[in-house]
Amino acid sequence: MAEPVLDIEVLRKSFGALLVTDDVSLHVAPHRIHAVIGPNGAGKTTLIQQISGALKPDSGRIRLAGQDITALAPHLRARLGLARVFQITSILPEYTALENVSLAVQARHGSAFRMIGPSSGTGPEPMRALDRVGLAPRHAIRAQRLSHGEKRRLELAMALAVQPRLMLLDEPLAGAGPEDTASLITLLAGLKQDCAILLVEHDMDAVFKLADDITVLALGRVIARGTPAEIKANPAVRAAYLGEDV
Amino acid sequence: MSRASRMVPIALFASLAAIPILREAGLPIGGFLPLIAGRIIIFAIAAMSLDFILGVGGLASFGHAAPLAIGAYAVAILDAAGIHDATIVIPAAMLAAGIFALVTGAIALRTSGINFLMITLAFAQMVYFAAGSLADYGGDDGYSLDARIMWAGWKLSGRGGLYAVSLVCLFAAWLLFRTLTASRFGRLLSAARQNRVRVQSMGVDVFAVQLTSMVIAAMVCAVAGVLLANEAEFVSPAYAAWGRSGSLMVMVLLGGAGSLHGAILGAALVVLFEEGLGRVTPHWPLIFGPLLVLSVLFLRRGIAGIGRGDG
């Protein structure tokens, strides 16, 4: 196996007496979609927050492309190639779709302190990214006027345009309608050509369609890992979900 | 931006420039109007600098009277030392206000929303009480300047001098903030108001961007403080009072937050109400208050936003 893009080693985090991340280790290989699943309260969100830098782990280590990022500020992790798509759609509502993507590209590749000269385009990448997600015809629309599904796509375009090493997708299908979900799954499946993906998703059908590897969390612990077929057949996973559809 | 809305700032600067010219030409506008207009210009500089952090950056500072007072006190302290050279006084005022913003901003920016508002207010109150304790500069009673600042031996007195310099400063401030707002830095500052976490995840040090904007705003506001001290030839702790911070905020909201030139409209309205209605009744805020409430309710983009359909 090639060097993992994301390498998490015995990560541990507790809130008071509550252990929410209990010695979690996890590796995401290049150009693979690694899904993290588990019932509510399994510690998926806490894990995501430790990877993005919103929370600091008590112990353990997180490496991005070989570099230790455990103690790094969130914006510095982004500069090293970590892109995020949030559970609740996170865009810049007052700017057009193209401006959203352009600003993401500018912020990633240049100084934030350029004060002279208008903030203008940055070559073809932003438009190309919008085209990938099917938003090119809507590039001049203000982001707040886009539909929910379009906002999701815009967020994906912003993540894609900065050419990240790893994309952190936190429930990218949340709130999407059935036909939206189908086309988003196709879109997401294509993204692994660009980068490695860590996917947290509740929609099990989508997870089994998309994921190359799956890690199952329950009460903060890794209870299973393997290919989708292995996870489907795993009795411990079935027990953890207790009747939830697996 | 439509052509009409681009004309508004130009029309504003043209009318402010016209006032002393018309007076020189002998039009019966009295000595009162240029005096009022002079104050409007000075407060517009302060309000515009606040608009940059409040309207563009979403940083609701309730302590913007602090850099104003620091600028004014820089004039008083240098006046007492016999220094009136504008090329010393203005940079000194800007430096002092910039350092103040750097230190207090670094602390205030650890909070947000209502806490940010309260902590900036607290820092401004510290300036207020510190100014009142400056016994060498009149303490609570304030300090009367010996002379106005000078530039290359040219004294800013007489009818037009200070007015012209103030107007040039306002125009320069407008150009500066307009350039900044359109730049990558300004776009990211605005983006951080719209969605802080998103900007952070784009790889931007939001704290550094916001702190820089606060320092720039404070330095420009200090220039307004220098002008204000020279206009009144008097400096007092009242410049740092919380009511002054509040009225700067009112100017920004009334004029149209984020528009920059709206600060001129807001400053004009507030000063005219203070001076005009204030002559009729000391209870003028009783009339002004409800008006402000109405404008916040019905003119969400302020006066500058009237006629712009892009809500």
Image (tube, coloured by chain):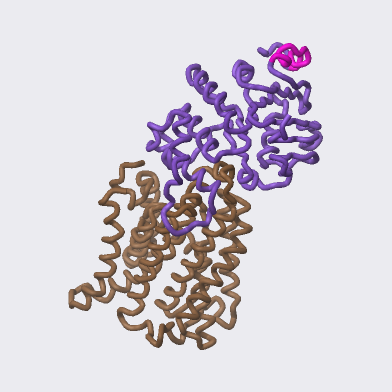
Chain colours: A purple, B brown
Residue A229: x %, y % from top left: 70, 14
Q: Residue at x 38, y 51 (%)?
A: B290
Q: Nearer the viewer, residue B177 or B287?
A: B177
Q: Nearer the viewer, residue A153 or A47?
A: A153
Please give left or right for residue A93 compared with residue B132 in the image.
left
A72 versus B49 height, above or below: above
Q: Quadrant of residue B42?
A: bottom left
Q: Nearer the viewer, residue B26 or A55?
A: A55
A190 versus B143 height, above or below: above
Residue placed furthest toward the front: A2
Secondary structure that dominates the magenta span: helix
Residue B140 part of the magenta segment: no
Work out whether residue B193 can be spotted: no
The quadrant of the image that shows the C terminus of chain B is: top left
Work out whether residue B148 can be spotted: yes
B112 versus A152 height, above or below: below
Q: Residue at x 65, y 30 (%)?
A: A198
Residue B14: x %, y % from top left: 26, 65
Q: Quadrant of residue A86?
A: top right
Q: Residue at x 57, y 24 (%)?
A: A189
Please give left or right for residue A52 compared with residue A98 in the image.
right
Please give left or right for residue A205 compared with residue B146 in the image.
right
Residue B152: x %, y % from top left: 40, 85
User: What segment is highlighted magenta in the picture?
Assistant: A229-240
Count of numbered tags: 0
Q: Nearer the viewer, residue B250 or A224?
A: A224
Residue A231 part of the magenta segment: yes
Q: Residue at x 47, y 26 (%)?
A: A149
Please give left or right for residue B198 compared with residue B296 in the image.
right
A218 versus A111 height, above or below: above
